Image: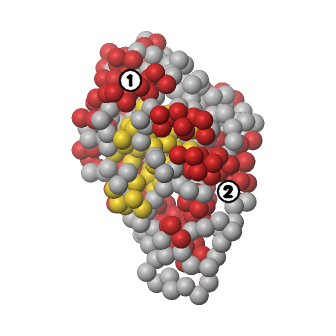
Amino acid sequence: MAGFTHIRHVEDARQAARRRLPRGLFEYIDRGAEDEVSIAGNRAKLDAIELAPSVLIDVTRRGAAAEIFGVGQPSPLIIAPTAVAGLVWHDGEIALARAAARSGIPFCVSTQSITSIERIAAESGARLWFQLYVWKNRERTLALIDRAAKAGAEALVLTVDTAVGPTREYNLRNGFGIPLKASWRAGIDVVRHPRWAVGVMLRALTTSGVPTYAHYPDEFRTRLGRAALSTEVDLAPDVTWNDVRLLRERWKGKLILKGILTVADAKTALSHGVDGIVVSNHGARNLDCAPGPTDMLPAIVAAVGDRMEILADSGVRRGADIARFIALGAKGVMIGRATLYGVAIGGADGAGHVLDILHQQLSATMGLLGANRLGDIRLA
Ligand SMILES: Cc1cc2nc3c(=O)[nH]c(=O)nc-3n(C[C@H](O)[C@H](O)[C@H](O)COP(=O)(O)O)c2cc1C
């Protein structure tokens, strides 16, 4: 894509995003939790997976087309839900959704999005999924999913790996937190990143005001800069399978649990009428002693893969990583940070460029593997 010729792989986009964003915001996106053991673990585990090349195969007509929940799409990708994507670029969630629409893949809107699902739907034309964090007030939570259904969300993605807030000491040190807090350190960080300060923060302040969580009920909608007005919309630490039952009764579309890492939980999800799961350790952002999704995927696929859709994420930085997840049995792969780096450097075009790179790399990997379809990709 014109304008991004210097961005040749995801790491280039990451470095460009690092230069553009305030350090606190960049670290919030980029880093892990506690000692960041599992962020390195995800990388090492992906790198250790070797795929089996078959030679002397005509790969002229190869393609990465996938079918997820019976809907065809040109690649097995879904843009993962990421809180506050609207802080990395003006209307960042709309930009991500437009990039997804152009690539023919779904965009999953986060509960903690800065832009409402209604606006994202109206201004992107993308296929939308909606990610849910359950609030303490369950009635309000159900009202939120009704709102997502009305806006056309095809799937509800209940995130189940965030029962409590993770420990990220670097964000305490660098001054970034939600709600945003004014501090000398944060102020200097913003001033040192003028393109972001003008293009995102000033633009927000002069149009819609201080960015807020768009899905929070009006009466509790706080500016990110102020403390929450009510604990009703705090994330609930007592979410159980009973909530899955409630959601299954209420939600007519596909129901997905994101953050499953054991066979036992995958089976329980199946018995609750869940349609799909995302085998994920949340991009190594939460539990720092979690296994990698690549460790758990084969056993989960063997146990329930014929009865529910198995998706995966955490750590994709190259097309080969997508191929690795597919070889382990995933039907679809979510992309979190990679497209966030892209949107941070160039809105929808930047995110689209990163998707194109991943797609080209996947196509090259498939060609070298002698794989004409995703189903031909095999472990070595
Ligand atoms: C900045 C950021 C915010 C995120 N916010 C959410 C969220 O609101 N809900 C959720 O389920 N997952 C969230 N995630 C996790 C992603 O959905 C996804 O699981 C993870 O990023 C995948 O790993 P990757 O970034 O290595 O691709 C977030 C990830 C990042 C990087």
> Marks 1/2: CA distance?
36 Å
Residue, disc 2: 46
Residue plotted at (50% across, 21% down): 239
* One can see residue 151 in this view: yes
In terms of image quadrants, where is residue 214? top left
Identity, as a three-letter code, of the amino acid under mark 2? Leu
Q: Is residue 17 above or below residue 319?
A: above
Residue 149 lies, in percent from the top left, at 28, 35
Residue plotted at (63% across, 48% down): 299
N-terminal-most mark, 1 or 2: 2
Residue 28 lies, in percent from the top left, at 59, 38
Residue plotted at (63% across, 34% down): 286
Residue plotted at (32% across, 39% down): 253
Residue, disc 1: 246
Q: Quadrant of the N terminus?
A: bottom left
Q: Number of marks in the image?
A: 2
Q: Secondary structure at mark 1?
A: helix
